[in-house]
Image: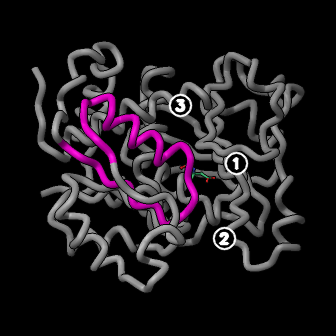
Amino acid sequence: MRHLISPMDFSVEELDELLNLATDIENNPNKYKDACKGKKIATLFYEPSTRTRLSFEAAMINLGGNVLGFSSSASSSVAKGESVSDTIKMISCYADICAMRHPKEGAPLVASTKSSIPVINAGDGGHQHPTQTLTDLMTIKSLKGRLDNLTIGLCGDLKFGRTVHSLINALVRYTNIKFVLISPSELRIPSYIREEVLEGNNVPYKEVTHMEDALPDLDILYMTRVQKERFFNEAEYIRLKDSYILDNEKMTLASKDMLVLHPLPRVNEISVEVDEDPRAVYFKQVQYGVYVRMALILTLLDIHIN
Ligand code: NCD
């Protein structure tokens, strides 16, 4: 049985297969509409979510399956003190696969060791968010036509932003990838990613504090929200939250085929005026998120449709 806890759980070849399946689903949705008939996904969300939970649920419904679950720890037995291990043993009796989001780093990994159904990490604290990475990879591959030879700017909260950590882990395995890390010094990428993942794989990167300096060189600009819920000190959050605001004026510095991605939710970091720019693809990204999650569910349940 397979789980998806980190983006590294799939090899580059397996990722390729998964993205091809997701594209086939995009092009032929009818072919897959009963693929998961009689199957259930449990969405166990101990932390707020809109897109991720609903996209898992939409994915399973599009495959003809059903969904069950909870959307906050307050409304589940966790509020009574139940452990993740006990919850997952119990859920294994109700569902065929589950997606778990948890504020504690490593909780989905612990769950996977006790589970008799595939567990998907839907975000664990400030650590990883592999299904957002699958979404990001599909967006880049579909709209840029490649996952190699790219200069990628990651901007905003690189310290707590789990989507950034997962995306770097996945992308360092492709050829000729360069990163420009754009953040205030307080929100720099964690040193384990700098040292083990970037330097460990000889991947070139630059750290800058001004977005304007980076924009002209980028193929992809990946914007992120300052992760309010991970700050210990509200004053510090308020001081840093508007560090970067992408607007139409800044977009004039970028190349005409640079793409702007964002895992969403957006707060202030992209002005709504940018939404009209054809380079802004963050709402398309949401749609790709459903196709890759459909592909992931089929892959982990070992369901093959010809
Ligand atoms: C992201 C997350 O939860 O980490 N959201 C998402 O799943 N699309 C990004 C964020 O919350 O800022």
Pick the front one: 114 or 216: 114
Q: If you read the primary sequence from the N terminus, does the residue marked by circle 1 or circle 2 appear first? A: 1
Element under disc 2: helix
What is the distance, in whole Å, between disc 1 and disc 3 at their CAs? 17 Å
Q: Which residue is mark 3?
A: 285
The residue identified by callout 1 is 155
Residue type, label 3:
Gln
Looking at the rendered structure, the kind of residue marked 1 is Cys
Residue drawn at x 58%, y 36% is 151
The answer to whether marks 1 and 3 mark residues whose Cβ atoms lie closer than 8 Å is no
122 versus 40 height, above or below: below
From the image, tell me which residue sits under label 2. 230
* Cα–Cα gap, marks 1 and 2: 17 Å
Q: Residue 144 at what x, y percent from top left?
A: 50, 22
Q: Residue at x 12, y 42 (%)?
A: 302
User: Residue visible at 21% across and 38% down?
Assistant: 298
Q: Position of residue 145 (x, y in %)?
A: 44, 20
Give left or right: position of 182 versus 262: right
- Which residue type does callout 2 highlight? Arg
Quarter of the image holding residue 256? Answer: top right
